[in-house]
Amino acid sequence: MTPPDRRHLLILGGTTEARALAAALDGRAGLRVTSSLAGRVARPRLPAGEVRIGGFGGADGLADWLRAERVDTVVDATHPFAAVMSGNAAAAAAATGVPLLALRRPGWAAVPGDDWHRVPSLDAAAALLPALGRRVLLTSGRQGIGAFARLDGLHFVARSVDPPEPPLPAALDVLLERGPFTLDGERAVLREYRIDVLVTKDSGGAATAPKLTAARELGLPVVVVDRPPLPAGVPVAASVPEVLEQLAGRGLTGR
């Protein structure tokens, strides 16, 4: 439990931005920072400071934890596609009266030369693929590969940090890699596997953006899955400095 004379900030998520925020706040006087990771990656990159791994048991479980640990503010720095966790954070914050701030990196924007096809879901991406190509690079995460399992006549190359679990496409190569990725490396992957269409979520950020440049250079179509919306009424910051500024205004960043 947090002592009454210390403020307690909970950071949700194992994203690059979540780790940067934890590092910026590590060691601040009068402030306890806890980073919470979902535990879905076997060997996660741990942030600075106090870390808990595993779920809370839904919105009610998170609300109970916020009360028990005397949390003063929650920063939802989860992946832009972690809609369930973001929904639970909003519900728990509303139930407890704990202020919530979402940290979301800006999404990607097409530039001249891009051949993007925006879709609302992985299922929609799967439905569109046969009209675009036959050799597919999937960079949408291991948990979404099942959406493509029933597609026949396509060869998939799926990139993820940990091995994917069934159901899986019949023709599948798996690349176990973790970003950030380089432009030269992305060019090599596209050429080696003779990729003719790329599937990605609109995660934003620089760590995985080189694949978009490589696809543009080769004139490849890119299927971009749009982000789910944040829960209504949750304030949003686009960067770690923006979060720090807002936390300072609330007297939560110590000295």
Image: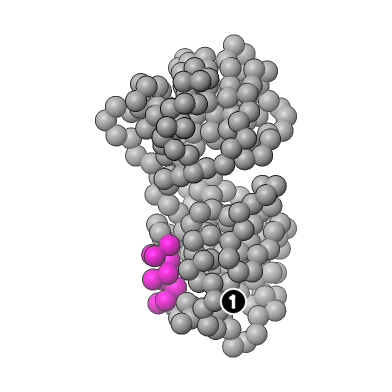
Residue ranking furthest to the left: 112
Magenta stretch in the rendered image: 240-249
Left or right, 55 with respect to 127, comes to right
With respect to residue 13, does 163 lie above or below?
A: above
Query: Magenta span has 244?
Result: yes
- Write the residue at 48% across / 81% down: 254
Q: Tell me the kind of residue under disc 1.
A: Arg
Q: Mark 1 falls on what kind of element?
A: strand
Residue placed farthest to the bottom in the image? 5
Residue drawn at (68%, 25%), measured in percent from left and top?
168
Give the main secondary structure of the magenta stretch: helix
Residue 172 visible (yes or no): yes
Examine the rendered structure and indicate whether residue 6 appears above or below residue 231. Answer: below
Residue 138 drawn in magenta: no
In the rendering, at what x and y percent does residue 71 appear?
60, 74
| Residue drawn at (69%, 52%) of the image | 39
- Percent position (x, y) of residue 64? 70, 69
Residue 232 in view (yes/no): no
Report the number of discs. 1
Question: Residue at horizontal 58%, vertical 61%?
Answer: 47
Location of mark 1 (residue): 32
- Name the side, left or right, on which 176 lies relative to 182: right
